[in-house]
Amino acid sequence: MKNNFIKLSAIIVLVLICSACRVQKNSKLGMIKLLTLNPGHFHAALVQKVMFDEVSKEVNIYAPNGPELAAHLKLINSYNTRENNPTNWQLNVYKGEDYLQKMLSEKKGNVLILAGNNQKKTAYINEAVQAGLNVLADKPMAIDKRGFEILEKAFQKAEAHDLLLFDIMTERYEITNLLQRELAQNPEVFGDIQKGNLQQPAVEKLSVHHFFKYVSGAPLIRPAWYFDVEQEGEGLVDVTTHLVDLIQWSVFPETVFDYKNDVVILSAQKWSTPLSLAEFTKSTRLDTFPDYLKKYLKNDVLHVNANGEMIYTLKGVYVKVGVKWDFEAPKGSGDTHYSLIRGTKANLFIKQGKEQNFKPILYIKPLKQTAAYTKQLNQNIKKLSLKYPGIALKPSDEGWEIVIPEKYHVGHEAHFAEVAKKYFSYLKKGQLPAWEKSYMLTKYYTTTSALSKASLK
């Protein structure tokens, strides 16, 4: 008994010492200083749409000179000069083709922001970790199996050197996704997750996106490489990253997966979206297709492999994920999201179609509508309203609709600040939760494995 007590005491002391070492190392981080590398996507700027107390206002940017850098600087300048709550970012910009080497040699910051060409992103992540930098990256972190293998090694290096890699999962902060997750973990309302089958998966998610849209009130001008799946990534490994993440987060909260055994890809397919030269020009402001896109031309129409669907099991639960890209949304609409989670007591739907005025609405559809269930449902929504004041329940053709006050619909762009806050809190603690690392590795294993399976056809 005495020996066991001594062993236990020694373990506790070691844990405390390790924790103290992490805190001491983290204290050396000091003020967070951002670096931005080759910002080819507007998400890089959205991270800086607000200021953060723990983040230096001085940001160092390294990129080749060109329209992508100009668009990035213009967007940040619009935040600095807006009338309401302007930001105060001070930008130091290095322009040159040796932007990566320059950033690594100068290392004027400690957190690298990545959002741009996905063909190079995994290599950038690996190089940054090798240089001792933390990384906050837009999705996807990897777009093929080779990239995933590099990413695995980057995570190993990061853990060995107490560095934090994190990807920008904004959809966790969208209110209907938050409430769907809350209800999926409520046994009185939802029951348990069904297992489903190939014909009727237990979880289904479909996302519809558009090449041409407006961001921060202005038309989004996309770089030409965005239409090259070798640089942007195919549909199965791009937007699906959000969907796979939401499934893990909603159905298996804070779970550490054994991804090589917990994930089984059953089927996967992909197909293209055709774009005319006029549509390409409207989106890019280029009047010709670059040479690297000509391999995707058929009768002068560009075919982009932006669409895909996969069916897989996650810890034995059947899941279906799909992504579709059109050129432009119908007037008054935008990107849409459909989500279904089947429980043993009720199914949880998110719909965002014409009937919902293209706004996401969450529904609860009981498998058996009884007076007892209705009473219990009302009691649980009342409890949930203590956490989310103002939400309510009303009957609908789908069963029950969760009425959500407009104040919660803050928009996609506002979610970037929430992701950044979460990441900075992890930096302050000096480590990621084990489940966060597992979620990232599991979802990129899932998406890149699905692409490999679809590519065999």
Image (cartoon, rainbow, N blue to C red):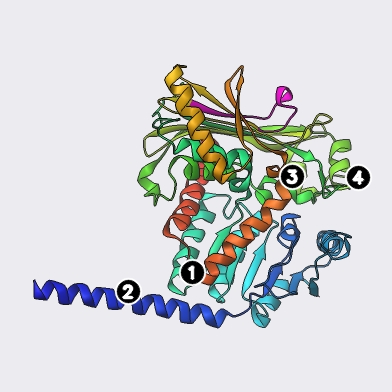
Q: Which quarter of the figure has residue 312?
A: top left
The residue beneath circle 2 is 15
Asked if one can make out residue 9 in the rendered structure from this viewpoint, the answer is yes
Label 2 and label 3: CA atoms lie apart by 50 Å
> Which of the numbered marks, if any, corresponds to residue 287?
4
Residues in magenta?
Answer: 347-360
Disc 3 packing (10 Å; few <14; some 14–19; many ≥20): many
Give the mark nearest the N terminus, 1 or 2: 2
Asked if one can make out residue 457 in the rendered structure from this viewpoint, the answer is no
The residue beneath circle 1 is 158
Q: Position of residue 116 (x, y in %)?
A: 70, 57
Looking at numbered disc 2 in the image, what kind of residue is underneath it? Val
Label 4 and label 1: CA atoms lie apart by 43 Å
Q: Secondary structure at mark 4?
A: loop
Q: Secondary structure at mark 3?
A: helix
In front: label 1 or label 3: 1
Looking at numbered disc 4 in the image, what kind of residue is underneath it? Asp
Q: Position of residue 226 (x, y in %)?
A: 74, 48
> Which of the numbered marks, if any, corresponds to residue 425?
none
- Could you tell me which residue is drawn at 58 percent across and 60 percent down? 422
Q: Are marks 1 and 2 in contact (CB under 8 Å)?
A: no
Give the mark nearest the N terminus, 1 or 3: 1
Vertical position of residue 219 compared to residue 159: above or below: above
